[in-house]
Amino acid sequence: MPVPATLIARIDELRLALRDHAHRYYVLDEPSLPDGEYDALYAELLALEQSHPELVTPDSPSQRVGATPDSAFQTISHSVPMLSLDNALTEGEWLAFDQRARERLGWDLSVGLPYVCEPKFDGLAVSLIYRDGVLVQAATRGDGQSGEDITANIRTIRSVPLRLFQSSIEPSLLEVRGEVLMPQEGFERLNAQQAERGDKLFANPRNAAAGALRQLDPNITAQRPLDFYAYAVAQIEGAEWPNSHGQTLSWLASLGFKQSHLVKQGRGPVFVQQAWQSLLDARESLPFAIDGMVVKVDDRQL
Ligand code: 5U1
């Protein structure tokens, strides 16, 4: 018997509503619905999907923990290498970088280069691949050339969209890079639970996040308080690249990715030094660990 159109429409409506509420809760930190109402919508979706399993799709909010435990992670080769960052540890090294960049770019010395400054999250870099807006693959950085397939574990992180929000640019393929981390509060809660059970304590939030991503059973990863911040795009097919890094970050936010409130845009080396000082001042009160500030020239052509 064909499925009534009203039922298909209701399932679509529930998925949209649940996606929207989860985005507000986990990405924007602005809950829009009491937990009980969210749970009721989720239960209604589960019931409809259980009575019509043929209507279940991999990007449904019900499918975050779907896969059964695996015996090993497969190796994935990165089409675009996952590079590491160079360091500037003193004011002199930073000023030398700025000067080198201006000279090599043939930049008018009287105008500061456009820069974006971002916190350097102390977590694990991952690559996420979306085909036609749906998450199809997630991999660790590994050695930068190839990493491990951790798709089932990444799917359990609520701030990772399983399906991208609609936008004016809709690439057929999009590779997003960013960092998985464990916020300090979640880390402390997890270690308290570990202590209660007599289990080994994690040395720091980064180790705890790494342990969570290494689990062969995604049900365990799903119980760990992980978060994901997107900071770069490595591949786009079927659409134009944004012109600048700042535009890339805004676009990623519109697709549903979490962005740090600590990102700053401005011009010239002094702006960067001020941004660094204000990040340093805020460091102790941040909800997650950072191990520096990342500076990017804010112009794709440059
Ligand atoms: N915030 C930020 N962290 N981080 C780490 N941006 C950023 N960019 C990175 C890395 C490894 O690499 C770029 C080359 C995409």
Image (cartoon, helix red, strand yellow):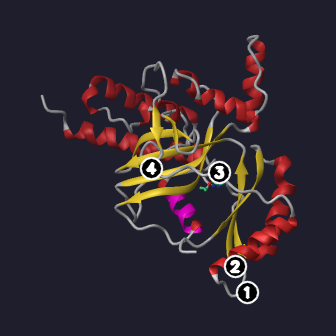
Residue at x 59% of width, y 41% of height = 143
Location of residue 183 with respect to 190 vertically, above or below:
below
Check disc 2 and give the amino acid type.
Answer: Arg
Q: Residue at x 59, y 67 (%)?
A: 246
Q: Is residue 191 magenta?
A: no
Q: Amino acid at mark 3?
A: Ser
Mark 1 nearby-residue class (10 Å; few <14, some 14–19, many ≥20)? few
Ligand 1 quarter of the rendering: bottom right
Compare marks 3 and 2 and give the one earlier in the sequence.
3
Calculate the distance from the C-alpha at mark 4 to the C-alpha at mark 3.
16 Å
Residue 79, numbered circle: 4
- Which residue type does callout 4 highlight? Ser
Sequence-first tag of 4 and 3: 4
Label pair 3/2, CB-CB below 8 angstroms: no
The relative height of residue 281 versus residue 136 in the rendered view (above or below) is: below
Q: Amino acid at mark 1?
A: Leu
Q: Label 1 belongs to which residue?
A: 109
- Residue pointed to by mark 3: 84
